[in-house]
Amino acid sequence: MHIVPGDIMDCWGLCRATLIAEAQHALVWKVHARDYGSAALKLYHRADRGNEAASTRLLSLWQDRGAVAIYAEAGKAVLMEWLEGPTLGDIARDGNAESALQVFSEMAHRLHQKPTVAFDELRPLHEVFNPLFDCTFARDCPDALQRDVIRATELASNLLTSQPQVVPLHGDLHTDNVIQTPSGARVIDAKGYLGDPAFELANALRHPNGMPDLVRSRDQIERCLQLYSGALGVSRKRLAQWAAAKGALSIMWRGHGTVSAAPEATLLNLLLRAADQ
Ligand SMILES: Nc1ncnc2c1ncn2[C@@H]1O[C@H](COP(=O)(O)OP(=O)(O)OP(=O)(O)O)[C@@H](O)[C@H]1O
Ligand SMILES: [Mg+2]
């Protein structure tokens, strides 16, 4: 059973903690905070918050663009505004994928239409992608997947050395990280990267979670590439290339550095085809 450490409860005047999400890197609790009322407490497993510590500063800078308000942070813990409502991923899974997509791309546009001053703690994209260049292949890794990961790695290398601009990026902007509240859509869960704006919606092509048929439909991939490149004002081809590169990186992450047969192989192949067009 998970319990919020007493010192965190005392320090921030919290009570009534209810666990609402168990994520790979963190637990999320709904709490009542003496100074704020309802709030969300995210407790990371690691003290460096999995290299995400800079993300709260970026979210604070973006508060007037729709990002969640950060109330306090210390060590592994972040206390933030409670956002009532379904994620855009939930709305899509509920049968309204089209409207979720519209709201989502408007949010991406809103985050990036004005420049954001870069700051040191953000992680450069080349650092994020570095492990991909050292990945190994399991003996039973299908040849086609191995070829695709090698091709995506070449793309990543070219993209990293030809970034037209380097800007602060949310880094994990997708439909399950946007909550539709009664007062509008709000963004959570940033990584805080620094790099090419065309990377920003690369991971969105792998979402919504739990809708593999939609995500793998060629029409849907093309539609998202058009919509997202328009929202960010970037090249469709570069966005497709980043999507393939991120797809390979995710497969590698899942295997902790070793690529083996993965359900995401089909999507990677489709993204590479889209990147070739
Ligand atoms: N401020 C908030 N208000 C309400 N619910 C929230 C808030 N922050 C997070 N949640 C809920 O918790 C879930 C998980 O949070 P979050 O997206 O931050 O982490 P994650 O993606 O699961 O984990 P990781 O950081 O490991 O990638 C969200 O999908 C949402 O349902
Ligand atoms: Mg998330």
Image (cartoon, helix red, strand yellow):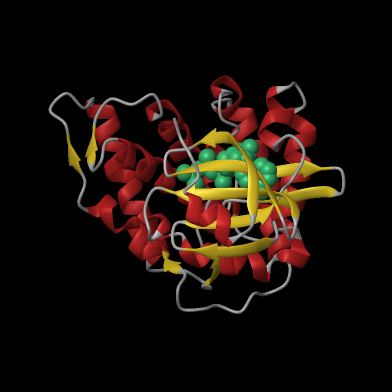
Where's residue 118, x and y in %?
A: 55, 77
Determine whether, in the image, residue 64 is placed left or right of residue 62: right
Residue at image coords 47%, 48%: 5
The quarter of the image holding the N terminus is: top left
Instruction: Tell which of 214 and 116 is nearer to you.
Output: 116
Q: Is residue 174 above or below residue 216?
A: below
- Is residue 176 visible from the viewing direction of this image? no
**Percent position of residue 26, x then y:** 46, 44
Against 164, residue 186 (above or below) is above
Extreme right residue here?
183
Residue 245 visible? The answer is yes
What residue is drawn where x is 72% and y is 72%? 114
Question: Residue 34 appears at what percent x and percent y?
Answer: 72, 56
Residue at 56% in and 61% down: 11
Q: How many marks?
A: 0
Question: 4 or 129, which is in the foreground?
Answer: 4
- Relative placement, left or right, of 83 versus 270 is right
Q: Nearer the viewer, residue 191 or 164?
A: 191
State the residue in front, 120 or 128.
Answer: 120
Q: Is residue 206 left or right of residue 226?
A: left
In the picture shown, does residue 168 fall above or below 231? below
Q: Quadrant of residue 224?
A: top right
Residue that appears at 58% across and 69% down: 57
On screen, residue 153 above or below 87: below
